[in-house]
Image (cartoon, rainbow, N blue to C red):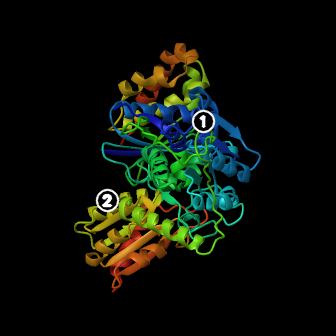
Amino acid sequence: MYGDVIMGGFGGQGIQVISQLVVEAAIRKGLEVTYLPSYGVEKRGGRTTVTVVLSDHEIGSPITNHPLCVIAMDVLALDKYQAMVAPGGSLIANTSLIPDEKIERGDISAITIRCNEEALSLGTAKVANMIALGAFLERSPILGFDDIERVMGDVFPERLHAKIPLNLKALIRGMEIAAAVPV
Amino acid sequence: MDRRLTKGNIALAEGAIQAHCRYYFGYPITPQNDIPEYLSRNLPKVGGVFIPAESEIASINMVMGAAASGKRAMTSSSGPGISLMQEALSYMAGSDIPCVVVNIMRSGPGLGGIAPTQGDYSQAVHGGGHGDYHSIVLAPASVQEMFDLTIKAFELADTYRNPAMIIADAMIGQFQEPCRLTPREPVVVPDKPWALTGCKGRAPQLLKSLYLADGEQEAHNLVMKQKYDIIRDREVMYETRHLEDAELMIVAFGTPARIAKTAIENLRARGIRAGLLRPISLFPFPVHQVHDFSIRIKKILVVEMNTGQMLRDVQISAHRDSRIFFYGRPGGGVPYPDDIEAQVVAALEEA
């Protein structure tokens, strides 16, 4: 069992949160995990990139140039990582901030979601990241809804615990949208 | 065993606390700032002392003073800061004073950059400071090893009364993995009858590296040589992967070793039998292990994030008939598994 994902966007889009959820859920399942956030100079540019590798075996490389999944939350992330997606892999693109015509690969499964609008329809644009994470879960053979639900209380600070039901709703919405896209 | 998602630098800092290090002196520099940040908050909680020094030179000399009093003491820095510490490191080696110095490397020369690199191998392993000495040098390749090898470094430093260094690249320092943050075995701090603790009721003691009498320095150097030979004999640490049937042996430490493991799995899926020897201790270097494997495995690929520093140790260690190839990515370049796979395939194709 092996999975990897690169998540990219700008600071404030909640990429750190959804990657933390994925990593904690995997650890809770007894899996090996590497979590490589963007660091150093990149940190200061307002960009956020995270590479997560999950496996039931020891993990070698914490970096990959052909991830099985990319979550692009804005157009800069799409420009940088679309070409890397492994053939047959998944691209989850936030088309609230990415023009549809930018999705060029025919050999991968592209899930385009207007994450910001979908989130707004649930009451707040803040859960756009959860819409994207839902799409990831729908495609992931390793993690499911229950795994994320189980760790939310640990990853979210106490003051946000009241918002967990709303975040779970956004997860489900993302899963529904992805389920309608052919693999 | 409870494992928590932990950043490499934090695992190292917690390892120091668990190793009963109670004195930290340092000056900030990226990419190791998580270490002093963590210790500034957590050392005082266990009765320890954290001092943000005015410079790296001050830091290492404060370490010398604390360590001379028999306490476990450390500092951490990166490239340029470590360069500034070399004089004091030499003094500590010459005075048989144990300490732990951490170098989360940045690319150089000069102020360089902060991306992952291994450009300080030669400085750490083959000198750095002046004089005829060695530091014990350990190279973690995982967050768990950042914790475990920090404890090991304090043990080795005390056992041999010698500076011990940990060198890691920024990837190991800043990525996160699940980590067990309790020591594998109970930590024991040995008695230090040599320590300078005030001579009331006993004869005065002296820790020094100045030997001017006829033949005195040579005798001291020869005693140090005996110590290094014992270290070479007893303290080599390394890991191997798939060497049993390998037609090529990759030798790599730190991040390139991690990436090589993935490359090796991918190659084996294609029927290409590559294996890995990962030195964990860089001094002592696994000289005999490289030699013994190289008798059967004729081709060796050294992978480093520099232009070829450990390469020389592999060349010295390997059997004279070995074919040694090198793949280096200096200045912050990090190889992908694909890159290493291509190098292995090319090396195997050469006659």
Left or right: residue B80 versus residue B350 is right
Chain holding disc 1 = B
Closer-to-camera residue (A91/B29): B29
**Which element type, helix, strand or loop, lies under badge 2?**
helix
Q: Quarter holding the N terminus of chain B?
A: top left
Instruction: Choose mark 2 or mark 1, whichever is in front.
Output: 1
Q: Quarter holding the C terminus of chain B?
A: bottom left
Q: Quadrant of residue B217?
A: bottom right
Left or right: residue B109 versus residue A62 is right
Mark identifier at residue B265: 2
Mark identifier at residue B38: 1
Residue at 71%, 64% in the rendered image: B110
**Tag 1: residue type?**
Tyr
- Mark 2 to mark 1 CA distance (whole Å): 36 Å
Instruction: Residue B65 in the image: state x and y as whole percent.
Output: 66, 47
Chain holding disc 2 = B
Establish if B147 lies above or below B325.
Answer: above
